[in-house]
Amino acid sequence: MFLGRWPAGDRSRAMSSTLRASLVCWSLGLVIAASSGTQSQQTPVSPVSPVKPDTTKLAEPASDSLMGGRSFGHVSLNVSRGVRVTLGNRSTGRITVTGWDRDVVSAQAVSQRGSEAVIVDQGPAGLFLKADYADLESSDPTGRTLDSPPIGDEGRPIQVHLEVSLPRYAVLELIRVWRSDVQITSIDTPFTIVGEKSSIILKDVGAVEIHTRSGNVEIENATGFIQVTTASGAIRVTNAKAGVRAVSIAGPIEVKCASGRVDVTNTDAPIDFYNVVGDVDAMAANSSVRFDGELEQDGRYHLRSMSGRVEMILPANTGGFNATLSSYRGMVESDFPLKATVSGATKEIIRSGQTQFNRRLSGQFRNQRAQIWLDSFEGLVRLTRRTTPSKSCE
């Protein structure tokens, strides 16, 4: 939608009703999905689109009478290329995965008590690993499964952490967690994580898909497409190489030094972009949208908010662009002199500093093909000229 074709009042009202309807429908869908989960289970329901497990994949075995069975503390297994790995945790402890250049899977379970048990199943469908409590009061710590978790000094169940090293090429099956934090580093294959109240930290990975209800999501150096949805956690993406799609209700979203198309939606928390190389589309309801960086020659930048501030900060030596700035109830300001078309007559706006023109300003700065749309229903809309260096990507 090119905003310059709409009369100011009609365009803003249309934008208002469309944006409000879209965000309300999306928010209701997320809330309904969130309310359908049961807190008594380790496996949550995805906040937007539940990820249905593939029944052909390796499921958790019904008993511990397995090939490998229960190991105490540490287990190491040789694997072949294309191995599929399923991970689990009986407690709410952390799951940590690190990729390496060996055809070996190494896993250990640890807690504040020391070594714990690792449940292992290796079969035609792949490899299953799960952290569990060991029976430390017995001469055989893996001889039986404890009926209830041991209690720590603070009167809470002790957390068992699962730490796994595996080949970079290994295929990670869907990771479902309730309160377990997940940290994954140096895995090349795509994977999906569904969490309830979980913090997710990823570094040097391929394509990823993350769905949580709460808990921060941090992703750094992803070579594949990133898709993240959350209800209340913060989303921070740095050095993405193949595009980003992020959705949140009440968590701030920051995308820094990303390449490829970036598509972001938020309701009650700010959206910030720094040095994004690619098209940008951002929509907020009750929060601000801010872009700070250089423009691509043919880039398209569409930043919108219902009631928040919308601002684009560009270097002083920006090559040029076509811009449409509008606000139905707020102010419209620009530090750049624009050649604007008003009521069929062309006039030159040459003042530097703040410029307001009937809450709508549309025109060209120099001769480049970049397209900018900044729009807010009742917030300030501002196009700012930066005089100091922006944040570095190094």
Image (cartoon, rainbow, N blue to C red):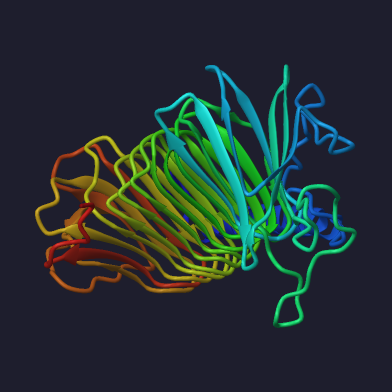
Q: Nearer the viewer, residue 76 or 274?
A: 76
The residue furthest front is: 139
Q: Residue at x 11, y 59 (%)?
A: 316
The residue furthest bottom is: 154
Q: Is residue 175 above or below residue 391?
A: above
Q: Nearer the viewer, residue 207 or 5?
A: 207
Tell whether 219 sits left or right of 336: right
Q: Nearer the viewer, residue 34 or 90?
A: 90
The total of numbered circles placed on residues is 0
Q: Residue at x 48, y 67 (%)?
A: 270
The percent position of residue 168, horizontal first and vertical second, equals 46, 30
Q: Residue at x 58, y 69 (%)?
A: 268
Tell whether 187 sits left or right of 364: right
The percent position of residue 21, horizontal first and vertical second, equals 69, 55
In which image quadrant can residue 271 be found? bottom left
Tell whether 22 sits left or right of 319: right
Residue 20 visible in image: no
Q: Residue at x 47, y 52 (%)?
A: 282
Q: Nearer the viewer, residue 93 or 48?
A: 93
The percent position of residue 351, horizontal first and vertical second, equals 13, 69
Residue 292 visible in image: yes
Q: Is residue 359 above or below residue 62?
A: below
